[in-house]
Amino acid sequence: MTDVRIVATGEKWIGHEVGSFSAAITAMMDSAKKELAMTVFVISDTEILSAIERALNRGVFVQIFMYDNPETDKFFFDHLLGLRENYKHAGIYVIKGNVLHAKVLVSDARRVLIGSANPTFSGMVKNYEMGLIVEDSSVAQKVLTLLWRLA
């Protein structure tokens, strides 16, 4: 049976059986045992970057598909690119030409977070954003198959 939960940002949406995006992302990253795959349009949330590195330090295979976005702070962009230099099990793919705007995180090919929030301060705290966590390995595998087409 598929388990689906809502996550959100924004003070009027959090609570009432709705979890926070940021907490969901870090929990998924911190509980991953084998692999993580995610898409990034823009990133500047240091806690999420730390969670990515904690996963890599545990030996989790991490794939990040990121848009070559001029709005991205060069520090964060270069930091992500540096991960593939420092970790042989980090796959960092820069998507050029077409805009990669999807916000997806897949953990251990069984849990998927799909939503509207970018991993930035605004996306995690300031804006009203919404997403779903789906616990279903067949859905996760379909999402991973689409992501791997970008590599």
Image: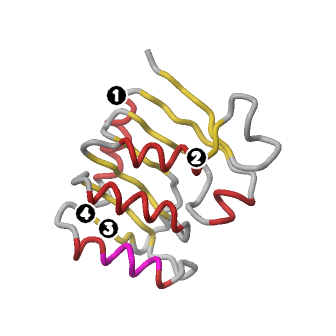
Location of mark 4 (residue): 90
Residue placed at 35% from the left, 33% from the top?
Answer: 110
> Mark 1 = which residue?
138
Which amino acid does the dot numbered 4 rest on? Ala
Kindly report the distance in space between the C-alpha atoms of the residues bearing marks 2 and 4.
23 Å
The amino acid type, in three-letter code, at marker 3 is Tyr
Q: Which amino acid does the dot numbered 1 rest on?
A: Ser
Where does the image place residue 84, in percent across and percent down from the top left?
Answer: 25, 71
Mark 4, mark 3: which one is toward the viewer? 4
Q: Residues within 10 Å of mark 3 (few under 14, many from 20)?
A: some
Q: Nearer the viewer, residue 132 or 95?
A: 132
Please check the rendered image and state whether residue 80 is part of the magenta-colored stretch, yes or no: yes
> In this rendering, which labeled residue sits more in front, label 1 or label 4?
4
Distance between the Cα atoms at labels 2 and 3?
20 Å
Magenta region includes residue 65:
no
Residue extent of the magenta highlight: 76-82
Relative to 136, residue 82 above or below: below
